[in-house]
Image (cartoon, coloured by chain):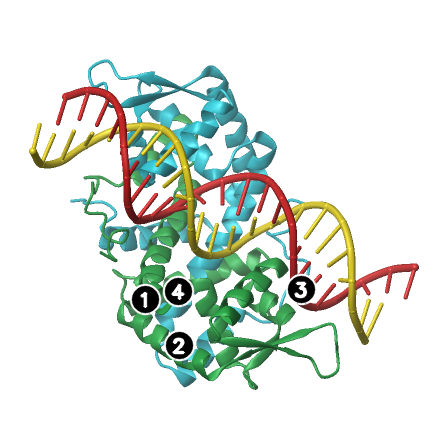
Chain colours: A cyan, B green, C red, D yellow
Amino acid sequence: VAYCALMPSHHPLPFDPIDRAAQLWQDRIGPAATMAAVTNIMRVQQILQSSVDAALRPHGLTFARYEALVLLVFSRQGSLPMNVMGQRLQLHPTSVTNIVDRLQADHLVERNSHPSDRRTTLVTITEAGRQRQKMATVALTDIDFGLIGLDDTQTAQLTALLTRVRRAAGDFTDP
Amino acid sequence: VAYCALMPSHHPLPFDPIDRAAQLWQDRIGPAATMAAVTNIMRVQQILQSSVDAALRPHGLTFARYEALVLLVFSRQGSLPMNVMGQRLQLHPTSVTNIVDRLQADHLVERNSHPSDRRTTLVTITEAGRQRQKMATVALTDIDFGLIGLDDTQTAQLTALLTRVRRAAGDFTDP
DNA sequence: CTGATCTCAGTACTACTGACATTA
DNA sequence: CTAATGTCAGTATTACTGAGATCA
């Protein structure tokens, strides 16, 4: 039932709709390579999001909330300021507020005051939050995060190509 | 101003947050290659969606509605049943209803009755819809669909890798 | 009767804008 | 005073569930 979106047993088309659209695009409009790549990213993201969210749903998490928990687990003190979380997770400030609200309602994180800067709010993961993150990580690794069909080399190639795009887009500044 | 999300001049981190998370993951949890690839797809999709939507906003379209218009333009009669649109665009039936509602409100498509099957609704693109699609396509090709940093070979590699994932996920069945 | 097609009501989640209070 | 931080209210978009009407 969780595979509903992952494996569309409904009506799996006997051809690749993206490839067909690219061919028509090439014939009628022009070079279609970029459009094909972008459409592929959009569709694969949708597939992964469905798989990941389905695996996390029994644990009461979404992928966005899961990423927030992982970030906190990886931090030294188990706590980070709201704005730092927004920078790392590339989230809008109001989205950070929203996600932390939901995690806090589930007692997975707490809001604490910053010792020196009274503007900032420190988000601290609770013991329950650490447990939940562990359980969710097992669920995700069990399904390989929904990413199937690639061997280790291909997975690394995919990461390298996408990292190149993010660097060009100014997602981060590296050496 | 449209580059707000594309070029986060706010606080571009001096390191790659995804790569750093992958290193910590490798140290504390285990193999991180798959997680890094999935996180990259999620983030790149977010970047592309922002760029594409910003380019389409002046034309009153979202990427989802734009894809629907392109699909209709490519069809022989300029019209398709709702369910076929859902299959091709991988959309939930209610999402098709939603998107067609908005396109119809803008007079870009019309709803017609099917000649032989009175259950199905035919969606037909209007002349205004064809014009709008042309304008939007120019806007999107001008920004290369937001995809930057890759040469032709790398773009093709990316498409090939993602197509492999979609095939494995049952997105389509090939010969 | 079974199943396909489409619609509607309502929910959930996230992104975003604009405004605001607090504080460095 | 200027800028940073976080919150709130409200809007937009899409995905989804569940129910229902119509029709092959």
Q: Chain of mark 2?
A: B
> Viewer-nearest of labels 2 and 4?
2
Question: Residue B66: which numbered mark, if any?
Answer: none
Same chain for the residues under marks 2 and 4 in the image: no
Q: Earlier in the sequence, mark 2 or mark 1?
A: 1
Residue, disc 3: A11
Residue, disc 2: B132
- Kindly indicate the quadrant of the structure image that contains residue A89: top left
> Viewer-nearest of labels 4 and 1?
1
Residue type at mark 3: give it: His
Residue type at mark 1: give it: Pro
In the image, residue B82 above or below residue D12: below
Q: Secondary structure at mark 1?
A: helix
User: Separation of disc 2 and disc 4 at Cα?
Assistant: 23 Å
Q: Chain of mark 1?
A: B
In the image, residue A26 above or below residue A118: below
In the image, residue A27 above or below residue B133: below
Q: Quadrant of the N terminus of chain B?
A: bottom left
User: Separation of disc 3 and disc 2 at Cα?
Assistant: 30 Å
Q: Earlier in the sequence, mark 4 or mark 3?
A: 3
Q: Position of residue A77 (x, y in %)?
A: 32, 17
Q: Say left or right for B43 vs A6.
A: left
Q: Residue at x 51, y 20 (%)?
A: A131
Residue type at mark 4: give it: Ala
User: Separation of disc 1 and disc 3 at Cα?
Assistant: 35 Å
Q: Position of residue D3 (x, y in %)?
A: 13, 36
Q: Secondary structure at mark 3?
A: loop
Residue, disc 1: B58
Q: Quadrant of the C terminus of chain B?
A: bottom right
Tell me whether the residue at label 2 lies in contact with that at label 4, contact meaning CB atoms closer than 8 angstroms. no
Q: Say left or right for B58 vs A136.
A: left
